[in-house]
Image (spheres, grey):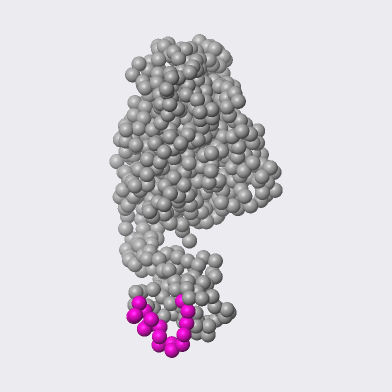
Amino acid sequence: MKKFFKAVSVLAVPFMLAGCNTDGVKKSSVAESSESAQPSSITSSADGSSIAVNTSSNVSIVHNWETEWTSDATNHWHACADCDEKKDSAAHTFGDWKTENLGTKLNDPRFNYSNVKYKECSVCHAIQVDSTHSVLPEIRFNYDATDPNANFATAARSTDVTRPSVSGTITITNGGSYNTTEPLAATMKVRGNQTAGFDKKGLQIKFDKKQKLFGLNGDQKFKKWVLLGDAKDTTISRTALGLTLAKGVIADDSKVWATDFTPVSVYLNNTYWGMYMLAEQKEVKEGRIKLPEVDEAETSVNIGYNFELDYYAKNEVSKGAEGDPTFEINYGNYFNQQSYNIESCLANSGLGVVKTYTMNSDITDSTATGNQHTDDTKSAQVAFIKAKLQALFNVLAEASKNKVAKDINDSNQVVNAPSGTTIKAAIEKHFDLNAWAEGFIINAVCLPPDVGYSSFYMSFDNSPEGDKKLRFDNPWDFDSNFGNRRNFLEKPDQANGNSGWGGQSYDPYFMDRTANMWLQLLGKMDFFMNDYVKPKWNAARTSGVFEDMMNLAKTYYAYYDGEYTKNFAKWTTTQASDNNVGSYFNGDGVNSGELRKPFVNVSERKEAQKETLNWLAKRVNYLENRWVPNSTRTPLKVVK
């Protein structure tokens, strides 16, 4: 400190030290100055910090300089953490061009086939990407243009219940050792529900023979793969972020399955179709969803079941015998929008609290024929899982809402638990709480509108070797998450022009009011949060899961910039600001579209990328403060 005061004493006039802050107001560390702002000069102290001395008012401003470089396309500098001042500003000094795969940079083999060409600043390590270089592996599907269903990739709409397949061949280019020497026979069709209403649609591949792709899932071979379009995500990163989150939170010994993934470019009949995420089909197969596969001749109810909370179950019924089996349970008086203060406009705008479910795994004892739809009246297996899920819900609701321990007998009837049974023991008996804690964290971080009414999967293993417990399974559908969709939290009568459109986009207490009854009821039990959720949260924080997500997002935005440009030259709008889902969001006086600013226009993708990073950082920091009071961990950094 002696050197510090000596450095500034050459001014030969008294002065006061003032700190800067984010609102630009200078606050004196000695006393408040009544003088107006005047010109200042910069003096450096011995410890490297800088003092801006106001030469008229004798007030010095101490800046909090960041050690990391901040940069744009041309320059780098050190920023003050508390205001907009910069120092050490200079132009980048880029080295030679080099080519490398992103798997090496991210220490993630899923990106080993993203080959980037870039040069790097020797000072701040900012990169400049060659946007003309082909980065992603290319999946090329070729088919007969005269096929009656040749328009499969453009004709399907969200209201259609059929998804015709087209036969053709797939070749892989720019994929290293996975490049094909001979075309692979396959079929392709549109997948998804609401997203089928977009021009850029999700697709499903079914190879004639099992194939391994880009080292995914330990290079295991499967017939079915999916191409996720992320058509309403102007950052084309939310699926990657969500699945990275899931992979990081799910423990090595967990029974929860999450798909592997890698970004690819898709071509249909040699026409560029966009940047997609290649992922695994969610199915019960060895190496995928962790349930025993069911023999086609099996008629017993002692099998594994995987099913979805599904608003679109009605579409399955419309498909007749080709539709997946569905069933419905009754929430009775346990769960309603009033008593649970649900603040999801999806629930409050006509969807309600969804109680329909669609089977994702095979049902093998169906007596359905012709156009009859397989349901619980035609299948003992469907009738079993319907009765079991109803009983499980009642046990959970009794424990969470009424603080009563219940049990389930061999006939799937809810009965009183044996005397002395605690609430914790009653729930642990019937629920895989490690899996549910993983699901709770995943959904608490990314705030998914969908899981309250669809795309929420569960499994129950009733096979002879099964644990006979309900578990959360195969996390899915992230394109509306991480602050992308507006107004899904506010009740319509409370929404306003700022709350959903330009506001922070998330309610800190989302999990307390989500329309997903399973997550909400579990989250209201202290033992579940304290004994299961918080330890898993601490493990994820310690292992750097969320830092990995931030790094992944930054890498995406920097190294895939050329791929973004190609994709949005093909698809010039997300359509999510004006398509038919806009009817869910009327009444806020702003817009009837689905997306929140700055995610509406593809031309604003740089702001969308920055907002996604900041949203994630703020969300993780909020949960850390709520679940780990007085945490000493370094918060995730908000990007300026």
User: Is residue 399 a member of the stretch shown in magenta?
Assistant: no
Residue 428 quadrant: top left
Quadrant in which the N terminus is drawn: bottom left
Residue at point 50%, 67% (across, down): 21
Residue 87 position, x and y percent, is: 42, 73
Q: Is residue 18 visible?
A: no
Residue at point 44%, 45% (across, down): 627
Residue 549 position, x and y percent, is: 40, 48
Horizontally, residue 153 falls left or right of residue 124, namely right
Residue 59 position, x and y percent, is: 50, 79
Residue at the far front in the pictured view: 420
Q: Is residue 496 above or below residue 514?
A: below
Judging depth in this view, the residue of 119 and 272 nearest the camera is: 119
Residue 196 position, x and y percent, is: 56, 35
Q: Is residue 378 visible?
A: yes
Q: Is residue 621 above or below residue 95?
A: above
Q: Is residue 638 above or below residue 535?
A: below
Residue at point 66%, 45% (across, down): 494
Residue at point 38%, 33% (across, down): 434
**Which range of residues does the magenta coloring cover?**
1-18
Residue 452 quadrant: top right
